[in-house]
Image (cartoon, rainbow, N blue to C red):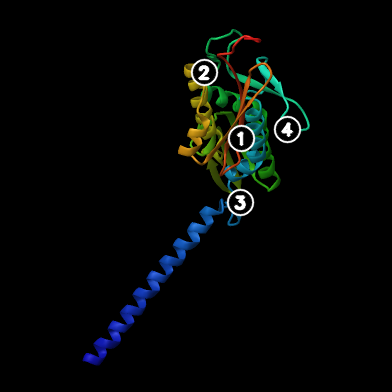
Amino acid sequence: MSGKRLVINKKGQVTIFIIIAVIMVGTIVTFFVLRSGVVPQIGGQQEKSPSSFLQTCLENKIAETTKLISSQGGYLSNSLNKTFKFTGATSYVGISYLCYTNGYYVPCINQQPMLISHLKKEVKDHISKDVKNCFDALGTSLTQQGYTVDSKYSGFDVELTDGRIKVPIDGKITLSKTGETSNYDNLNVSFQSKFYDTAIVVQEIVSQEARFCNFEYLGFMLLYPQWEIHKLFTSDSTRIYTVKNIGSADTFNFAVRGCVTRPGL
């Protein structure tokens, strides 16, 4: 009897181990499928996730846009700027004044107290056509793969958050093929960026310049070594700040003019 029980117990253990192994393999496969941005295709094949397509389509444009805005003091275009050429640069750039007064002996006035909201609008305005074009290109790509595509685009938004730029797209796509249908309406894309984080530091500098006519940037860098800040002075007493995130190399330039003494005094 004891021998039979031993055989039965061993068989039971083998069965349990097989079940556990199947579950583990299934979990691992599911993890890598989701991680790769590939979802099962209707009809038994595979298709690239619409969000992954949009991510790839918009990635370079987002990076180019934030770089342009950051290099010009937070604006795509602004008449209140200081034309400046950095050492080693090949051309001049108009750097916006984020804190400015044309008077003497008085602090500068914060020109963009809602900086984050302003930057969000600048990014949104600059990528608007690209988001629509990428959405249309997604539909075209799926049609070329043999799908019947029913899509509706209703716009998008931009969210600036810690370490990321998010672009939730208000769009719906219905795909039909071989008698099966698949729906997509959660077309959110997200990009790694220190654009928001850098803007928070810029806000602090502008705030202190407006209140105290100065920003103690050396002390700030000692407290927050992930930031590198440079301050240059021009002949008209404008201060050009450059804020750089060391980990990502994101850089933001802006100009300040305030608490200026009259020439010759």
Task: Pinpoint residue 31: horizontal percent, then vertical percent.
Answer: 48, 57
Q: Residue at x 61, y 51 (%)?
A: 47
Q: From the image, tell me which residue sits under label 2.
A: 213
- Quarter where residue 2 is shown: bottom left
Q: Residue at x 55, y 26 (%)?
A: 120
Amino acid of disc 2: Cys
In the depicted view, which residue is nearer to us: 186 or 112?
112
Q: Earlier in the sequence, mark 3 or mark 4?
A: 3
Q: From the image, tell me which residue sits under label 4.
A: 87
In the depicted view, which residue is nearer to us: 191 or 112?
112
> Which class describes the residues within 10 Å of circle 2: few (<14), some (14-19), or many (20+)?
some
Q: Earlier in the sequence, mark 1 or mark 4?
A: 4
Disc 1 versus disc 4: distance between alpha carbons?
16 Å
User: Are the two marked residues, 1 and 4, in contact with CB atoms closer than 8 angstroms?
Assistant: no
> Which class describes the residues within 10 Å of circle 4: few (<14), some (14-19), or many (20+)?
few
Secondary element at tag 4: loop
Amino acid of disc 1: Thr
Q: Earlier in the sequence, mark 4 or mark 2?
A: 4
User: Are the two marked residues, 4 and 2, in contact with CB atoms closer than 8 angstroms?
Assistant: no
Residue 47 circle label? 3
Secondary element at tag 1: strand
Q: Nearer the viewer, mark 3 or mark 4?
A: 4
Q: Residue at x 71, y 30 (%)?
A: 86
Q: Nearer the viewer, mark 1 or mark 4?
A: 4
In the depicted view, which residue is nearer to us: 107 or 105?
105
Q: Residue at x 69, y 40 (%)?
A: 140
Secondary element at tag 2: loop
User: Are the two marked residues, 3 and 1, in contact with CB atoms closer than 8 angstroms?
Assistant: no
Q: Earlier in the sequence, mark 2 or mark 1?
A: 2
Q: From the image, tell me which residue sits under label 1.
A: 251
